[in-house]
Structure formats: C-alpha cells, structure tokens
Image: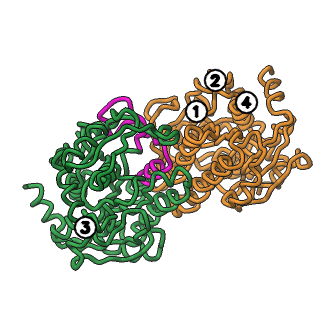
Chain colours: A green, B orange
Amino acid sequence: MLQFLLMQNTFRGKEILITGGLGFIGSNLAIALVKAGATVTILDNLTPGQGGNLFNIAPVKENVSINYSDIRDRLAVEQVVKNKDYIFHLARQTDHILSLTDPFPDIDVNIRGTAIILEACKKYNPRARLIYAGTRGQYGKQVKLPVAEDAPANPRGIYEITNLTAEKMVLVYHDVHGVRGVALRLTNIYGPRSQMLHDHYGVVNWFVRLVLEGKTIPVYGDGKLKRDFLYIDDCIGAMLAVAATPACYGEIINVGRPDASDFLTLAKTIVKVAKKGRVALTPFSKERAAQEPGDFASDIAKIEALTGWKPKTGLVKGLQKTVAYYRTYGKNYW
Amino acid sequence: MLQFLLMQNTFRGKEILITGGLGFIGSNLAIALVKAGATVTILDNLTPGQGGNLFNIAPVKENVSINYSDIRDRLAVEQVVKNKDYIFHLARQTDHILSLTDPFPDIDVNIRGTAIILEACKKYNPRARLIYAGTRGQYGKQVKLPVAEDAPANPRGIYEITNLTAEKMVLVYHDVHGVRGVALRLTNIYGPRSQMLHDHYGVVNWFVRLVLEGKTIPVYGDGKLKRDFLYIDDCIGAMLAVAATPACYGEIINVGRPDASDFLTLAKTIVKVAKKGRVALTPFSKERAAQEPGDFASDIAKIEALTGWKPKTGLVKGLQKTVAYYRTYGKNYW
C-alpha cells in the first residue's frame, strides 16, 4: 500500500508514452497509469496477430491519447517522444513462430524500432526515462535455477536474440549518450488482455481459451518443463516500481518468480479452475525442441532489493481472474 | 607446413564465397585461397570508407570472380551462395565512429545483412559451411586477461552489439536450421591491404600511415592500454584452419594473442621500424572514453586445441612487413 501511494505521487501529472500500448502488457500498464493520475499517450499500429486490441483499453478510453503509428516511422516517433517523462517501450514483433521462418520482421521491429526510439530520445528528449521490456528467453538454456541477471545470455531463437540486442542498445545509450534506460527481462506473463487468436506466444492464455471452448490442452513432452508464470498485475507492479526507482536505470532487472510450476500442473489447474476442458501430452515439433531452453525460474533478489517489489498473486488466484475475464469478455478476443 | 599442406587439400577445387572480399581481411583471404587452389567468388560493393579497394586483389585479379552487390540485396545473395562449399562472411559496416552518431547502417548491414546470408544458405545451400568473422569488441570490458570465449559479452558500442547479434544468429541457424556456421572473434588485426583513409578503425595501420608521412602518432591517455595486435597472415591462417576443421562449427572461437602490447610500445615500435615520425600522448574524447573497453588479450587455448593454430609473427616482424608494403604501395591507399 505504501508502495502504491508512493507510485501515485511518482506518476501523478506525468507525461507517459507507451509503445505497443494497445497490446497485452501495454494496455494493462496504461490502465494502471491513468489510475495513478498520469497523462498517457499510446503509440500502436494494431499490427495484425501481435496482440493490439482497442477493447483492451475500454476502461480508460476517454483518458488516453492514441497515436496510430508504426514504431519504425522515425518522424512520428520523434514527435511523440517529445516532453514525455517516462517511455515504456513495448512495441515488438512477438510472434516466436514467425521468427523461425522469417527473421526480418524481428530484426526490423525489435532492433531497428528500438534504435529509432533511442535516437529520438537522444535528439529530442534526453531527459526521458526509458523502460525497456525484454524477455527471459534472452537467457536461453540455463542449468542453475533461479536465474540471476548475471547469468550468460545465450538465446536460442531470433525473437530472443533481437530482444537481447535491443536491451544492449538501451544500456549503451544509457552509458554513452545519457538517455536513462532500464532493461527488464520478463518471464511468461499471463492474465487479462492477452491476445487469444493463436498459440505463437502467450501459452497460458491460449490454454485458457482452449479450456473455455471445452477443448483439450496439448502439453508438450512429458509436461514436466518448469516456468515461473507471472500474473499480469504483478508484472505491472514491477514495471512501475522499477520506473519509479532512480537506482534501477542502467540496470538489467528480472521480473518473474523464483518458484516455478510445470506445464502439466498449469494445464490441470486451468481445467480445475474453469471446470471445463481436459489435458493431453503431445510431442514437441523438431524446431520447437531445438529452441526449447528447458526449465526456467527467475531470481528476483535484485528487483526486491532495489524496489521492494515481489509477486503477490499465486497461480490459482491468477488463473481464476484470467478465466473470469475471458468468460465475460472472450467475444472481444476470439 | 603440415598444416599448410592439409589446407591445400581442403580447399583445392573448392567453391568459395567471400563477402566483403575486396576489403582488408577478405582480400588477403582471397589471395591465400587462390594459392590453395580454390575457386574464389567475391561479393563486394566497394562502399566508400569501408576498406574495399580493387588494388587489394591485384595479385590474383585474373583468378577471382567479383560480383558487385550490396550484402542487403537478397536476390543477388541468393544467387551467389548457390553451390559454394565455404562462405567467409566479412561484409560489414565497420566504421566505429559512425555508429556513435547513427546506429542504422550497423543494424542494417551487420545484422540484416547476416540474416540475408543465413536465409539464403537455408533455402539454397544448406550444405555450405559459413565462417563468420566478429570482433573481440563483443566482449566489452573485461577484468581477467586473457579473455576466453565463455567470458560475458557486454559490448559497449553499436558496432560491437551488431557483431554480437550476427554471431548469435549464425549459431541459431547452426543449431536450429542445420546451416553449419562458426563464429570467430577477431582481435585488432593489422598488416597489408587495410584502408588508410581514416582512423575510424584499423588503428595500427593508421599509425603506420602517419609515420610514413612523417607525422606524429597521437596515443590516447597514458598509452598503457593493452591490445593483442595480430598480424594479418596469422589471422588468415587461423580462419583457414578453423574453416578446415569440422569440430569448429557451432563454436565461438577467439583469434588473437594471449600476449598483449601497449599502445605506446606499438607507436614507438612503428617509429623505430620506419625510422620516421614521432609519438605524442593525447586525451581521449568523452565518447571514445565511454566506449573504451580497457585492456584486452585473447585466450587462444580453444583454437589451438581444435586446430593446432597459433600466431607466428611478432610485432616487430609484422610491422616491418606492413611498413614495407605501404612504402611500396601507399599511393594506392591514400
């Protein structure tokens, strides 16, 4: 509660830009920031298949400005970064499956798009604080769990590589050009406002859709693969806590949980919570297997030490909220 | 000698593509491969300021094919990769100073250009062996010398980040798509055929030009910064040894020296060898200082174990050859 009040003061009256603000994380962030009294501008172009959905911001649609633009539109980006206090950079090519067959959208949107934001800040708003949201996929395969920020980063796919590259650019602009930036590595996030049209990313939410449609959840391999699934409200809390903490800038910071669940447990819990659907084990495709980094859990000692943040929502509670949201609003997502 | 004979057999009659083959390393490689009996195709577009120079291949100009093309021309690249046994990928935006003010050429040429080569191999020549030449700059600042391949990679500039990204893509295509690739991390290479028009990269050679013109070598800071300067013939030997060794594919491999020299010693040695010029200490610029990764020396245990390669040419001998080359052919370089 103290943390929440502090944040209200931090963001009240502040000018915020959220790139990809009509997507899953961006829209939840926009809603939280409007509630905290900030003036929010969203930059998004609703790229099909990437999670952008106008319904996501329904609760605050009168209170945010939307600037429809591609992140790669340099002139547009130069205008919208001006006078912003905080920039949450979430616009991304997120389709992990696409990146297996075509690396170019990832390179163009995730790397060049981030460079466009950084250059725009350098030229037109060097006092902005930039919060970059990367992925735990940047770590690749790890043997020692939970994984801390100083573990080697050996990503196994183009999506993950391009996120790592963008992170490194953010840190170079912080060090060399004085554009303050912090690089988050988000674990698997689930909850309301994630896309529900395909299973190319956002696997927890996809499982929820299958169950709500009375279908079978296909769990890869033996289902024992572990992930630290994090509920969206916890993720938003972490992002705001980091943004509000000056000591976080210039750092790489994990956002996840040290306690992981396996996919079979996840799937069975969804079925139990929804009282629908069923679970079946299914083999990995060859390419999925080659990119699969194994078990994962996040060491969050750093973010806890810097900001006091820790996750509050367990898997059952988070899934209950997720199932309830899509039961009510599912027609806006599939 | 045994190594040399083995290589002659390895490359005799083989089809080779060298991207950036009119540049410093590419042209020396082309000459060596023609001598080894290979059929060499060069892809280059002589981008101004990047080191491409037709004079570089004068000794073999009747024995190589030149395909003038930008590495980013997908259709052209798709044609030239066909039927090649080995592809040495050296085309790069190499101007470290440019990348301080404009990150986009590095992203486009170094990252997207490498993806174009990889996709072309995947589609049209999956049996090719790809040798990617990155830079020791990918390591960034290191405290423990010499630096081995498993040291953390924290590059401090856009040029170095884009090289690291390209390396990671090469390794993903090796692991996931079966395009065999090896990623070299080359230290500071010097010797005949490097560009001599500016000091944005290739600092040893630039010092040689200053001295040959009777000018003063400006050495940054106190001149005690250490680097493992490697003579070009040793670099070419390493690249051919790696290319010829199947166990190297899928690996990251240093090409350098474990014994470093400092910049002041380097500059004084050049003056001594050339019997001309002088040396003066000069302060770092602010941006150079921010990107300066400190002392460096390469741990080469891995390449030595895999291929038997080790450097043969010391600094004095290498500088004598370099000075002699530019004394004779300088008019073709400045």
Labels 1 and 3 in the same subunit = no
Q: Amino acid under label 1?
A: Glu
Give yes or no for residue A46 being in the magenta stretch: no
Q: Chain of mark 2?
A: B
Against A156, is B9 above or below?
above
Residue identifier under label 4: B244
Residue B25 tag number: none
**Residue A108 seen in the current view:** yes
Q: Quadrant of the N terminus of chain B?
A: top right
Residue B251 tag number: 1
Real-space Cα distance between discs 4 and 3?
A: 55 Å
Residue identifier under label 2: B306
Between tags 1 and 3, which lies in front? 3
Q: Position of residue B307 (x, y in %)?
A: 67, 24
Q: Earlier in the sequence, mark 2 or mark 4?
A: 4
* Pointer 3 local density, CA inside 10 Å: few below 14, some 14–19, many at least 20: many
Against A141, is B303 above or below?
above
Could you say whether the residue bearing mark 2 is in a helix, strand or loop? helix
Could you say whether the residue bearing mark 4 is in a helix, strand or loop? loop
Q: Position of residue B315 (x, y in %)?
A: 68, 32
Which contiguous range is marked in magenta?
A: A138-167
Q: Nearer the viewer, residue A159 or A203?
A: A203
Between tags 4 and 3, which lies in front? 3
Cβ atoms at labels 1 and 2 below 8 Å apart:
yes
Q: Quadrant of residue B176?
A: top right
